[in-house]
Image (cartoon, rainbow, N blue to C red):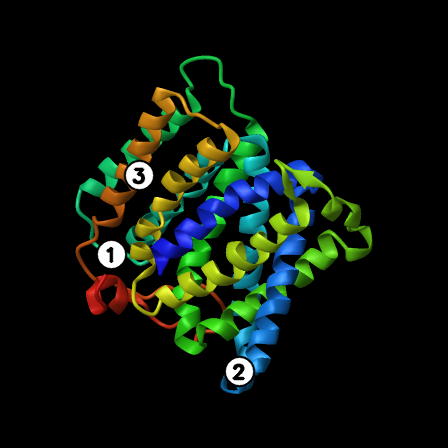
Amino acid sequence: MVLVSCALFAVNGTVAKLALRGGFDAPQLTTLRVTGAFAGLLMLSLALRPHARRLRVERRELPLLVVYGLAGFYFVPMLYFVAISRLPVGIGLLFEYSAPLLVALWARFGQRQRVRPRLWVGLVASLIGLAGVAEIWGDVHLDGVGVAAGFAAAVLLAVFYLLGARGVQARDSLSLSCWAFGVAALAGLVIRPWWHFPTEVLGRTSGGVPVWLLCAYVIVFGSIVPYLLIIGAFRHLPPTSVGMIGMAEPVIASTVAWLALGEALSISQLAGGMLVLLGVVLAETARTGKPAAEPTLLSAPDLVTATTARDDGGRSS
């Protein structure tokens, strides 16, 4: 499930970049994406009667849904769109996908889990790899805003992983995705109101493809399907494993962007990217024990239930 979602997300990077080139800005494309995904998931939920009953939301669930929707479903993709509009798709994703490293660090310091020394080796390897991606020893060509957006997306993606593992304990994947996209759609309505939406862009072409078709992919195969898959995967894998497997996305995305957009990376950038992936794998496989105390992420304690049993091998990965 995670690998299929990675492939769909990876293609979505190139598709979204073409849509951005067609005339959208990052907030507009994000608003279109989340609103379309919410409408699609809502119709699907209502069509499936058992799922329609599960759409009911209790007041105590609101904190998790709001934070989860804003962090993982609106600001992560918007910041990612900002990053890839200013950077090659593969590099933008490498910065974003330092998120699994943050999850591993949270397991060590937030959940107080014992770790093997290779956590620190992985951290150093990732930092050196990112330096190689940025080619900091010469004239730095990477856009500063794009890099900042990529790192900000990484922080929020880590929140998405952690809260997703908790959200599936109280809700099925369909209703959780639906309401998270609903929260994101409301945020988009505030940040980029629909009455300012450039509808004329949909009639253009970008890279020889109609922009409306690109947007359809972004909504269906770049949002609805992969989010359902990755949220469903949290029922079978801990967030650290999901994050580690998800590192396949930058590799696939770089290949797709090279084939479709001609975005070739230098040898040092390719080597740096591989070092980042190696560092994340080392960091995420470094934990050895259970946390001393269960942290509280939100003010609703009955929502934030422990997931350490999953993290410690309670489910096969």
Residue 216: numbered disc: none
Residue highlighted by disc 2: 48
Whole-angstrom CA distance, mark 3 to mark 2, is: 40 Å
Q: Amino acid at mark 3?
A: Leu
Q: Amino acid at mark 2?
A: Leu
Q: Left or right: 107 with respect to 8?
A: left
- Identify which residue, 41 or 167, lies in the foreground: 41
Whole-angstrom CA distance, mark 2 to mark 1, is: 41 Å
Whole-angstrom CA distance, mark 1 to mark 3, is: 22 Å
Q: Left or right: 1 with respect to 56?
A: left
Residue highlighted by disc 1: 113
Q: Residue at x 51, y 43 (%)?
A: 13
Q: Earlier in the sequence, mark 3 or mark 2?
A: 2
Residue highlighted by disc 3: 277
- The local secondary structure at tag 3 comes to helix
Q: Earlier in the sequence, mark 2 or mark 1?
A: 2
Q: For label 3, count other residues whose C-alpha is less than 10 Å away and answer few (under 14), some (14-19) or many (20+).
A: many
- Identify which residue, 211 or 138, lies in the foreground: 211
- Identify which residue, 295 or 149, lies in the foreground: 149
Furthest residue in direction right, as rendered = 195
Residue 59 seen in the current view: no
Q: Say if mark 3 contacts mark 2, CB within 8 Å.
A: no
Q: Is residue 128 above or below residue 105?
A: above
Between disc 2 and disc 1, the foreground one is: 2
**Where residue 134 sits in the image (x, y, percent)?**
43, 24
Q: Say if mark 1 contacts mark 3, CB within 8 Å.
A: no
Q: Earlier in the sequence, mark 1 or mark 3?
A: 1
